[in-house]
Image (spheres, rainbow, N blue to C red):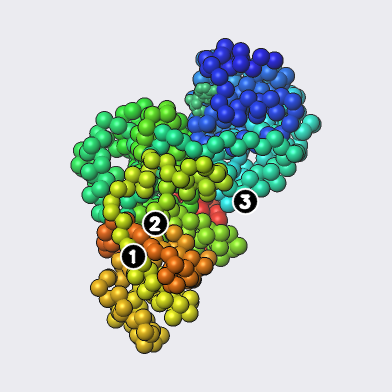
């Protein structure tokens, strides 16, 4: 079989991208596969080509209703018969399509997971041969992921009902261990061929900004890029709405997208953005999976997301066309508070909670390290690199003077030691700055010999240095909602004078918002959410919260 010829003739491409050939070969030889490739790595071709070459019908299960039509149209243009089944069809259209599927008019059928176990569809599949099922965005099956879709859990039940167990091809851009384990386990993949291609996106430039006025930074940035397209991610619906209004008032062309908007409204916003009618999309993480806009020149995270995975996937929506693009994360401490609150809400003290806090801390470290950001990201995804600096991230390009902060570090480390490694960042910083905070006195911490030994700094400055020391491994944090700062073997080296510590740039106070306001805005989101679910279920709102499992609510939240 000349796969290269098929690639050329049907798709017009000269050569396969990394992993594509192997995955296609694997499927054609009858093996289950697990393709882990970064966003825009070219996963679709890996199931489209086998579908073309196999007898019978290939089902493509995808959560992305809005993208099905585009993919099907593109396939038809290349002369490949394809169709889709999802909730956008009228029952009349649906009936016709089902009949066409029965009479073998399509090679590929895209289907939303909710449709699989419907009587109409089950009826049809008994009459046709389905040698291969592709499960796109297969991380949606895992509750560990940020895109968990309960309907994906329906897939195994559907497969079990088929006359013959088809070959399964699973595809995702998510590579964390727990999720991979879930994909293999829940879908019961049979000794799958697992291909992980490189995760590096060389055309993306990574930047972290902290201790800045975010709004000012953003406006400045956008002004210089009025001719380019970009996405701005915020943590909550409320923030999306207020930023949308503000930018609109300032004359920017913006669209917004979040889970609180109606389906049509969202579709319209997405189309406006995709077809270049608006240059900026302001959105929660509800926007994005599978978005194929090639010329996104920047992705700005106005709020820090919940973990590296979510970050890399969202940032990865920049530069799909291979042109240079920027991924900027604006860090502020209140984002940490916000994320912790969301974790509490979504995990409800289950065993997932600890993992969620751990993953959050890894991202906080990313925001504070001096290491190459790209290296941190790739290392997180299990990729080893043979270089130390990429030369294309804000840390590699940071040419600010390095300051010797060994003395500060020593003071902090000894304070952690004197506080018996039992307090969080804020408390340690309070003691060092000599804060008059009531809690300090209630615990008698003002009697410690390290109380006030850094009074020339504000508590906030000291917090920032502590977070830097954590990010660089001089300190560590325990897991959980209230992490405690602990010493590491590296702390000993500093305390004994064997290692010096350097930090770039000024130590400036960070903007900070009262925690109260954060909670309030989140509570409002939750109230809206409760209302929405209640309406959908036709029950009074008080039934929904707090009794509804928060897991269920988490699906709706952004
Ligand atoms: P993913 O699903 O992995 O995010 P897609 O399948 O949407 O990525 O592919 C991303 C883009 O790359 C698409 O525009 C696709 O046509 C293009 N593409 C895929 N394979 C190749 C190839 N072998 N050569 C050139 N372009 C390709
Ligand atoms: Mg895809
Ligand atoms: Zn770098």
Mark 2 crowd level (few <14, some 14–19, many ≥20, 10 Å Cα): many
* Label 1 packing within 10 angstroms: few (<14), some (14-19), many (20+): some
Q: Earlier in the sequence, mark 3 or mark 2?
A: 3
At 42% across and 47% down in the image, what residue appears?
A: 372
Query: Mark 3 against mark 2, which lies toward the viewer?
Result: 2
Instruction: Identify residue for label 1.
Output: 405
Q: How many marks?
A: 3
Q: Is residue 528 visible?
A: no
Which of discs 1 and 2 lies nearer the camera? The answer is: 1
Q: Is residue 196 left or right of residue 464?
A: right
Q: Which mark is residue 178?
A: 3
Vertical position of residue 3 compared to residue 337: above or below? above
Give residue 154's quadrant in the image: top right
In percent of the image, x 67 and y 37: which residue is there?
A: 194
Is the C-beta separation of discs 3 and 2 under 8 Å? no
- Helix, strand or loop for disc 3: helix
The disc placed on residue 312 is: none
Q: CA distance from mark 3 to mark 1?
A: 38 Å
Q: What is the x, y in percent for residue 57?
A: 68, 23
- Residue 426, percent from left and from top: 38, 71
In the displayed image of the protein, which residue is found farthest to the right? 163
Mark before the other along the chain sequence, 3 or 1? 3
Please determine whether, in this image, residue 130 is positioned above or below residue 403.
above
């Amino acid at each position: 079989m000349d796969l290269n010829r098929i690639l050329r003739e049907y798709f017009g491409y000269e050569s396969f991208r990394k992993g594509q050939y192997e995955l296609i070969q694997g499927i054609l030889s009858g093996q289950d596969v697990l393709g882990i490739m970064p966003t825009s790595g070219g996963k679709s071709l890996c199931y489209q080509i086998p579908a073309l070459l196999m007898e019978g019908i290939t089902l493509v299960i995808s959560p992305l209703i809005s993208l099905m039509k585009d993919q099907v149209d593109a396939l038809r243009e290349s002369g490949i018969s394809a169709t889709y089944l999802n909730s956008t069809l009228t029952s009349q259209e649906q009936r016709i399509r089902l009949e066409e599927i029965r009479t073998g008019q399509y090679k590929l059928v895209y289907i939303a997971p909710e449709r699989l176990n419907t009587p109409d569809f089950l009826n049809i599949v008994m009459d046709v041969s389905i040698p291969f099922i592709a499960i796109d965005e297969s991380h949606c099956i895992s509750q560990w992921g940020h895109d968990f879709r309960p309907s994906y859990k329906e897939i195994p039940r559907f497969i079990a009902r088929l006359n013959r167990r088809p070959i399964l091809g699973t595809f995702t851009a998510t590579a964390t261990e727990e999720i991979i384990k879930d994909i293999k386990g829940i879908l019961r993949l049979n000794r799958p061929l697992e291909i992980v291609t490189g995760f590096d996106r060389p055309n993306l430039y990574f930047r972290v900004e902290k201790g800045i006025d975010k709004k000012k930074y953003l406006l400045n940035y956008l002004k210089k890029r009025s001719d380019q397209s970009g996405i701005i991610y915020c943590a909550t619906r409320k923030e999306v709405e207020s930023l949308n209004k503000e930018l609109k008032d300032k004359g920017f062309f913006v669209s917004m997208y979040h889970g609180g908007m109606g389906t049509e409204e969202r579709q319209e916003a997405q189309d406006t953005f995709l077809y270049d009618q608006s240059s900026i999309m302001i959105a929660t993480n509800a926007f994005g999976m599978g978005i194929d806009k090639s010329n996104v020149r920047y992705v700005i995270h106005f709020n820090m997301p919940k973990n590296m995975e979510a970050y890399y996937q969202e940032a990865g929506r920049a530069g799909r066309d291979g042109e240079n693009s920027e991924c900027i994360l604006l860090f502020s401490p209140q984002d940490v508070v916000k994320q912790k609150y969301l974790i509490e809400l979504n995990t409800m003290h289950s065993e997932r909670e600890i993992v969620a806090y751990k993953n959050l801390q890894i991202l906080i470290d990313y925001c504070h390290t001096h290491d190459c950001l790209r290296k941190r990201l790739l290392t997180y995804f299990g990729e080893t690199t043979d270089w130390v600096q990429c030369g294309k991230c804000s840390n590699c390009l940071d040419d600010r003077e390095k300051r010797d902060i060994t003395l500060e570090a020593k003071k902090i480390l000894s304070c952690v030691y004197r506080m018996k490694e039992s307090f969080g960042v804020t408390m340690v910083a309070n003691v060092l700055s000599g804060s008059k905070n009531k809690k300090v006195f209630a615990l008698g911490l003002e009697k410690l010999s390290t109380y006030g030994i850094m009074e020339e700094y504000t508590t906030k400055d000291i917090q920032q240095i502590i977070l830097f020391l954590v990010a660089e491994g001089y300190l560590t944090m325990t897991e959980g909602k209230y992490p405690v700062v602990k010493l590491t073997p590296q702390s000993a080296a500093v305390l004994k004078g064997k290692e010096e510590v350097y930090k770039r740039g000024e130590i400036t106070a960070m903007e900070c918002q009262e925690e109260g306001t954060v909670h309030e805005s989140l509570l409002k989101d939750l109230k809206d959410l409760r209302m929405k679910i209640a309406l959908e279920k036709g029950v009074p709102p008080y039934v929904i919260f707090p009794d509804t499992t928060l897991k269920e609510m988490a699906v709706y939240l952004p």
